[in-house]
């Protein structure tokens, strides 16, 4: 992971016109294997997890993913985060959750509040 982040940092330096240890040859070799220069974030990542939630719902008949879901711990954490962001959104504070994301989650029967 450290090495990968170093390559990304050197690539950014190179693109910004700063001193970089990333040579033309190494750049070409990394590109030839499909090296991903940026971490996946934002909407792409959200859409991926949303797709995983749809698959979960198809399998189990609901969107009640446990926070510590053993088959996909990242999905469990993501679902928990959506609920927390929803609470923030409802208070009017800045939230990563948008009205469109809420609509999409509502459309698949997402449970915003879980009974303990």
Image (spheres, rainbow, N blue to C red):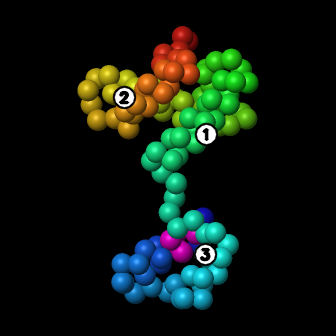
- Residue 91 drawn above or below residue 3: above
Residue at 46% across, 45% down: 43
Q: Nearer the viewer, residue 46 or 21?
A: 46
Contact? badges 3 and 1 (CB < 8 Å): no
Q: Nearer the viewer, residue 52 or 74?
A: 52
Name the residue tied to disc 3: 31
Who comes first in sequence, dot 3 or dot 1?
3
Residue 65: quarter of image? top right
Residue 48 position within the rendered picture, expressed as x and y whole percent measured from the top left: 58, 42
For label 1, the SS is helix
Who comes first in sequence, dot 2 or dot 1?
1
Name the residue tied to disc 1: 74
Label ID, residue 112: none
Q: Nearer the viewer, residue 36 or 19?
A: 36
Total tally of numbered discs in the picture: 3
Which span is picked out in magenta?
A: 4-8
Density class for disc 2 (Cα within 10 Å; few <14, some 14-19, many ≥20) is: few
Name the residue tied to disc 2: 99
> Does the magenta-highlighted stretch encompass residue 6?
yes
Q: Is residue 7 visible?
A: yes
Residue 7 position within the rendered picture, expressed as x and y whole percent measured from the top left: 54, 75
Q: Quarter of the image containing the C terminus? A: top right
Q: Is residue 101 left or right of residue 3?
A: left
Q: CA distance from mark 2 to mark 1?
A: 23 Å
Q: Quarter of the image containing the N terminus? A: bottom right
For label 2, the SS is helix
């Amino acid at each position: 992971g450290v090495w990968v982040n170093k390559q990304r940092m050197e690539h950014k330096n190179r693109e910004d016109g700063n001193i970089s240890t990333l040579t033309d040859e190494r750049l070409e070799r990394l590109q030839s294997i499909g090296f991903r220069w940026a971490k996946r974030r934002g909407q792409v990542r959200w859409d991926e997890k949303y797709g995983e939630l749809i698959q979960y719902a198809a399998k189990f008949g609901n969107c009640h993913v446990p926070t510590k879901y053993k088959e996909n711990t990242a999905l469990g954490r993501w679902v928990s985060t959506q609920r927390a962001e929803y609470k923030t959104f409802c208070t009017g504070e800045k939230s990563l959750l948008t009205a469109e994301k809420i609509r999409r989650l509502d459309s698949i029967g997402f449970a915003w509040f879980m009974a303990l």
